[in-house]
Amino acid sequence: MGNSYAGQLKSARFEEALHNSIEASLRCSSVVPRPIFSQLYLDPDQHPFSSADVKPKVEDLDKDLVHRYTQNGSLDFSNNLTVNEMEDDEDDEDMSDSNSPPIPYSQKPAPEGSCTTDGFCQAGKDLRLVSLCMEQIDIPAGFLLVGAKSPNLPEHILVCAVDKRFLPDDHGKNALLGFSGNCIGCGERGFRYFTEFSNHINLKLTTQPKKQKHLKYYLVRSSQGVLSKGPLICWKECRSRQSSTTCHSIKPNSSVSSTATPENGTTNGYKSGFIQTDAANGNSSHGGKSSASSSTPARPGNYSLSPRPSFASGDQATMFISGPPKKRHRGWYPGSLIPQPGLVVPIPTVRPLSRTESLLSTPVPQTPLTGILQPRPIPAGETVIVPENLLSNSGVRPVILIGYGTLPYFYGNVGDIVVSPLLVNCYKIPQLENKDLEQLGLTGSQLLSVENMILLTIQYLVRLGPDQIPLREEFEQIMLKAMQEFTLREKALQMGAQCTPVSPGQLPWLARLIASVSQDLVHVIVTQNSLAEGISETLRTLSEMRHYQKLPDYVVTICASKIRGNEFCVVVLGQHQSRALAESMLTTSEFLKEISYELITGKVSFLASHFKTTSLGDDLDKLLDKMQQRRGDSVVTPFNGDLNEYVSPQEAAAMIPTQNLDLGNETFQIYQPQLTVARKLLSQVCAIADSGSQSLDLGYFSKVDFIIIVPRSEVLVQQTLQRIRQSGVLVDLGLEENGTAYQRAEKYVVRLDNEIQTKFEVFMRRVKQNPYTLFVLVHDNSHVELTSVMSGSLSHGEPGHGLADRVINGREVLEAFNLLVLQVTSCPYTLQTQQSRISTSNEVHWMQLDSTEDVSCEEKLYFGLNEYSKSLQWGITSPLLRCDETFEKMVNTLLERYPRLHSMVVRCYLLIQQYSEALMALTTVASLRDHSTPETLNIMDDLLSCPGKNRSGRGHMLILRVPSVQLAMLAKERLQEVRDKLGLQYRFEVVLGNPASELSVAAHFVARLKTWRGNEAEEWVPRTYQDLEGLPCIVILTGKDPLGETFPRSLKYCDLRLIDSSYLTRTALEQEMGLACCYVSKEVIRGPTAALDLSGKEQERAAASENDTEELLIDLERPQSNSSAVTGTSGSIMENGVSSSSTADKSQKPPPTPSFRSPVPSAGLDEGLSAGPAGPGELLKQECDSLGPPLASSTTAKPSPSSSGPGVLPWPGPPGRAGRPPQAALPPVVILSKAAYSLLGARRGGKLPAAAALLPHPDVAWASPLRPPPPAHAGPEEQSLYYRRWTATRPHHADHGNPPDPASGARACHPRRLLLSGPPQVGKTGSYLQFLRLLFRMLIRLLEVDVYDEAEINTDHSESSEVSQSEGEPWPDIESVSKMPFDVSVHDPKYRSMSLVYTEKLAGVKQEVIKEPKAEEPRKRETMSMMLTKYAAYNTFHHCEQCHQYMDFTSASQMSDATLHAFTFSSSMLGEEVQLYFIIPKSKESHFVFSKQGKHLESMRLPLVSDKNLNVVKSPIFTPSSGRHEHGLLNLFHAMEGISHLHLLVVKEYEMPLYRKYWPNHIMLVLPGMFNNAGVGAARFLIKELSYHNLELERNRLEELGVKRECVWPFIVVMDDSCVLWNIHSVQEQTSQPMETGVSSKNVSLKSVLQHMEATPKIVHYAILGIQKWSSRLTSRSLKVPFSRCHVHDFILLNIDLTQNVQYDFNRYFCEDVDFNLRTNSSGLLICRFNNFSLMKKHVQVGGQRDFIIKPKIMVSESMAPILPLQYVCAPDSEHTLLAAPAQFLLEKFLQHASYKLFPKAIRNFRSPVLAIDCYLNIGPEVAICYISSRPHSSNVNCEAVCFGGLLLYLCDSFVGADLLKKFKFLKGATLCVICQDRNSLRQIIVRLELEDEWQFRLRDEFQTANSSDDKPLYFLTGRHV
């Protein structure tokens, strides 16, 4: 029993306890038997737990304890001394104090017929170690064998199997509570209680069975396999400390250290200061045995609401009766529970000394070696006897705030006092690092003296006044301020004399002086000897006071002791303050248990009977019955009638409201802010993927799947399901079919309850089975119940404990590479601590709502906590945030009368009475009106009258927040009863909002809702609060926390009067206020905001209106203006003198229009608005919960989610509604308790509400009492950093176990975890559902590539070439190809705007046909999206397992592993030596030959033509690339199917470092610096030159090895960096219609394409091989010819041997390949294109040739007009603007655009082309060029009959002579253009070619490119043919 989970009562336990109780009472000599409850829950050996649902009657308990602890009935204090457990190897029998017999422990009798022999289990199986030592014992995983000692068999050890989680670790820590064990003898498993287990193994104990006492040793197997006794089980924390912590005096230890450890304290973050050693906890692990009778000094009691030992869990309440608490929860508290009367209470001492022992160490008795306990008297001065009946007499339970120094022992009636560690930490100055001290403005030396601390404390208490309670956070800031002041003063006084501190002698009168201004609220008592004197005096005075006498609120007791220095503590006597302080020490769970205990045990009966009568003194029930009789059967009309109109119930049920609601338009929209946040999430995911940490590889996934985990709330589950269904996200992500998505949605939302395990396992199986799907685990409301699994057994049956931790932080989730975790919350503080698992960079916060660029276009504005706080400054008669003063006064009176009840119980009973009486006052007993508070009356009046106003029957919703489920049920029953007796059951509904259950609404109300909704199915029932839209109802919302449920627009009132001082954390207050947060429509935001500056841009969001009803109506009937302007008050904003764009500007207030000037009418908002049926909250939230209009983009086409678990989802609707007057909508009115109001409302000087400075969450603690205040106007990012620096998790928090990185000390953040935070109800659900959609689209985008999709140009299929090869041939036949004519026309679509190449066919083409397309501007090239396949080439953004090695080197050190090699060769074309650099990674050195010394690069290895290896591509691949270090498709791993290949990147010198960074494993060929500005021609020229030179070197090298020169492989591949996919095509014959033959294509790898081409027969006879460009328009006709002899581009197999004498033009920027192809062909060499292969080119938007921006060499001004192509040339020596661009580039660009000027005769005259000798240059699409080679024996087009329209001579060489030119005929007026390197050679050419004979030149026809002379301009001369 002692080790049971103290959760729900099991009937077996109850029976057992009852049986034992009866038996004990029969044996007991004392008069009062021990109460059953105390036996169940208060067993001396039982340790603190929290879920005591059933507790003892206190009076019995007191008597019982008194009897039990003294034999003669009188209290004997002489030897009440601390007795400690002695857990030594000897199993001592119980040693009792001489005064008290041991309490008999009566065991359950063994079952009939079972074995009871010692050493055997009840099944008769032997358990003794001697008989089992050789046995092989099977035990389950996670269990250990341990030895138990039986008192009856001292020489034997019994073998047991125990789950190791319930055993301690080596330090005596971390044993879970409870027990789990198996019997080794009979094999019975699953003993959950040690009691039950000890019975089973026949331990036959006389004391309470405890695992700590009876499980002694670990059992170990020796090397021989013998099981033997092993080490002792270390139940205590390290025994080695015993000697050091023993203190040889019973006096409290006075040397106490101040430790700077993070606090592990209570709810309010007050650190216990215990280093958790049992010795330090007042019960060191040695000393005598502790039996129930040993009077142990118990610790000062924590607040308990009844004078019984209360059991609040954990920190602040730990019961010490016997040994240390073995079950520990949340650190451990000096303020522990009320001990039993007659016990001495040792109180911890506090003294800031820097020693390392525990802070509040407790007295530890000396243990004489004999083991006989010597009684030691306690000095009288150090004890305080708590007077009897203190609470009963005074009505106050004093709270003693631990101050500084040694607190005395308390004994006597200690149940009536509470010791609170609230401010104790403020007096302990921690050691901070220097940087922190600097941040705080302190110097390390500056500590406050005790005197100063005392004075500050008194001053603070004086300042608090009668209403407020001390707040730790406030006082810490005061201490910090004081220390800063001292620092400043020290600095100022460093020059002069030192300032004199307060001397101890001055202290008493200074203290009294400060207290004197407090109007007797603060008293100071100064004593000489010890604090005990002052405390005793205070308590004595208190017990003798009469109720009517005035008490001080605080008594500050100062002990000015000569020996110990000054010590002090504060005794809080104020009725309000003491209760609030005590209650605030309990966590939410604890006080809810406290309340349930009070209700179960009937302690509330006095209170209940008080409320049986009305305020007028009548018996309430009788009064109600009388009214029911008077009314008879009839009921109040449901709607459209007054409260005094009655109808029969049948008639009432049959009444049907008008269906004029526009709820039908449930379109789902995503608004701009939601989209923005979704995009922020997406970019964060991309950032994780790009971070290089290899934690997320987006390129790997092709699908998105998700699961949403929500807290235990049925409504929240339904609400999330609704969002998913309406958003269509399941269909959009391709997870479900359209038809089934509705039903299937349920598997995507999981509730954190006991079923989660199975559902989650299914999900994790899906994660493992689908590695290519990216799963997103959304943890919504992730701040709720974030407790760790490890602390699970301490929760005592709290459901949901540790479940979130098990799911979110489970190993599987952390390790799954395809799983992202998104934690969504409106209160992120508990996730932002020093131990946070989320990296700061992975936090995405909702946009600061006041920073939206142009709020004016948003139709809805968010109205949240800040706006509520600010609305208090509007100065309107009915504020939105209210405190019901009358109610508070009533509460205070009642609280004084019932000091033993929790204040929430009292408040709740009063609230129920208030609402009941208001109902009666409004219907029948008008005289009760004066006895209801105006607030309550007002609310009920509105609720009842609204439905009566018209036929629609719509009304408001009122939320009553009652956290305790029992109280909520009570409230519901009571209000329903009153309602029904008054005949209002058809007027409004009372709904219990219990998270654990579904909504239950009466059938006639469901019918009404269905009518309003119109098209609902027969079986429809409301499942979410939003479904109750328009229903007049009271929702009693219960549960520990509101969980983010969204409320309808008809919510008008939020009654939070029960949320009191138990809610002193930021999260708690913000959650409660979150109920009312919503979006408000713009029209509302009017008068108040124009009149008041609401600090900052948030002005437009503040919503309220002071206009009276008529004005509001006029106002709102205006048609809404378009979304860019806001509807004005009377007229548009423009009339008010403010343009729509400046609405967001806080400095401009619209001047008031006449409608504003009328004085505010006396009617408050409520009255002014209750005229029509729709409530303010309703119109207000009538659109989607987001700030913006629906997006015009693709998101509107698909409806998508628009709100968040905490998010509003009202539907859009026009401002005026048909059939009833439109109304303005205001946010719900919130009624708060005084405590909450003072925290939320206090905004002095634009400061944050006080709530912002509170402890952020009960599960975290402040890391230091010295810390800066929270940043005032900080955004969420700064707040996050603040909390991450200054808060630490408590031990039971799920992040507490997050281990720091051993190296850096930083916490490990999980790389794939994100946090989305935003205020409550702002639209987070919509946002994350949209994020899923965007993520999916992006993954699809990552798997897609935009490739060019353009049909070939200049095609003419009219005649197929005469010489064709048969279709099925895989390779070209050299004979056939050489007989084909070369097709000089360029077909590549990228050359659409280039000059046509003249052919004889072209001469016949009508020019008009060509005219149209050619004249157009550069057009956007067509692209098509294609899915990437496994054979694609990739850029740097692709990461995957396979090519990981290929892309990256294994470690950073390898960057240096690549070596740089110079390679020099001479080039005849350049006429000089060229030095290139190779950068060769170690892994690629095998492709090269190095000199014998190993350092000098000799050549690149080439294979032989005869090599037949199937898995090799022979040709080296060269890829020139520029400006595309990230985007170039240079990863050929997949395209080459992972085989080894030789790939060289050809890069410019200045780009080399970038390419090296991104492609460290690639071989780089670095061009000389002189080519940094060169075009692609230079790269191709150098590739070819280098390759030929290398071919010669390899031939020489291999010749020495006996290989013939011609056998060396002469081909290289030159391909662009944008080639992405390769395809193979085949023609499918279709029998039916022979014309319609289809083309089937298949994606193939680059490897297979190259291998196929390299296998071409007689390949060495081809000069160039290529493939065609892919297009979706590829037809079977174009494939009829498998091979063509025509131009090839972008991807070529080049024979460098055959083309040795044909060079690329290294000057060229454009068309270098066309030029090269024409020259190759005219040299008689074969070019062949494989038509059955095609190449897809990716549309890459960066890099390549687009990078030259032509700018003036000397910039005159930034904003210059663009430079036109005709300005690229100028007359030589002119004053023209010189340009910073290469001369050749300017020339080519000029020629493209200047054909009109240069060759007018050839424009659109293809019969008269321009003759270009030895070159092809693009001179514009209107002109054709006839290419002629000047080389002898070259093959040229036949142009005998052609009359040329112009002549182009470009850098002519010596082959061009005058004779050659004389062969050609020119038109009269044809033009000539001669281009040369300089003016000199220009003149020489004209002379050499005898041009002046036929051409006429003028001096002004000479031009140069617009370069400076340093840039070597090109010169050209134009002339006319004569």
Image (tube, rainbow, N blue to C red):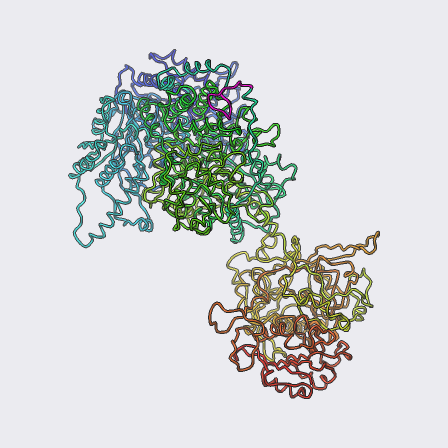
Quadrant in the rendering for residue 1396: bottom right
The picture places residue 1598, in percent across and down from the top left corner, at 68, 71
Taking 379 as reference, is 101 left or right?
right
| Residue range highlighted in magenta | 636-650
Magenta highlight on residue 649: yes
Q: Quadrant of the N terminus?
A: top left
Assign the magenta stretch its main secondary structure: loop
Rendered view: 930 above or below 1648: above
Residue 1147 in percent (x, y) is at 38, 51
Q: Where is residue 1739 in the image (x, y as percent from the top left)?
A: 62, 60
Q: Is residue 1866 left or right of residue 206?
A: right
Q: In this view, does 1075 lie above or below 90?
A: below
Within the magenta stretch, is there residue 1153? no
Q: Quadrant of the C terminus?
A: bottom right
Residue 1462 visible within the image: no
Whether residue 1511 is visible here, answered yes or no, is: yes
Report the front residue among 1001 and 191: 1001
